[in-house]
Image: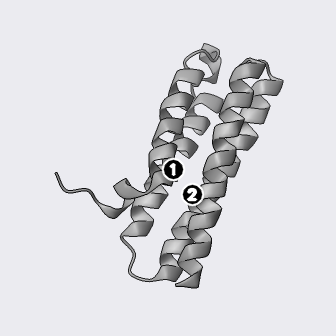
Amino acid sequence: MYLYAFEKLEVWKESIKLVKAIYVLTNNFPENEKFGLVSQLRRATISISSNLAEGTSRSTDKDKAHYTTMAYSSTMEILNQLIISNELKFIDEKSYLETREHIYKISNMLNALRKSQLKQ
């Protein structure tokens, strides 16, 4: 089976792992958050991998870097929502710290990818 460029990116693979983790994590949120934080967290998490996929289809390095920047912005959005979820006690401290560490890893990978795209 042919793999597209985005499927070969380690950061894309990590972002898919984060999507799965966020879906599991948000399954335990209160029902009244279904259209609030649950929806926002899931949308923003999917946005990381989607922007990476879209960015690899762009022809210029500047455009590719733009989509990587958008993926990074979604990563920071997730972190903010995760902090709020922790403050509201929707998630336990262990889950919060584990997910935050995963976000840190992805954000570093995105920064490295963006730098490489801008150097080309």
Residue 61 image offset from top left, x and y in percent: 49, 81
Residue 78 lies, with reference to residue 32, above or below; the image says below
Q: Which mark is residue 47?
A: 1
Residue 56 image offset from top left, x and y in percent: 40, 68
Q: Residues within 10 Å of mark 1 (few under 14, many from 20)?
A: many
Q: Amino acid at mark 2?
A: Ala
Q: Amino acid at mark 1?
A: Ser
- Nearer-N-terminus badge (1/2): 1
Q: Nearer the viewer, residue 4 or 63?
A: 4
**Which residue appears farthest toward the right when viewing the image?**
87
- Do we see residue 48 in this rendering? yes
- Do we see residue 36 in this rendering? no
Q: Which residue is mark 2?
A: 71
Side of 56 where 119 appears, left or right:
right
Residue 100 lies, with reference to residue 13, above or below; the image says above
Circles 1 and 2 in contact, beta carbons < 8 Å: yes
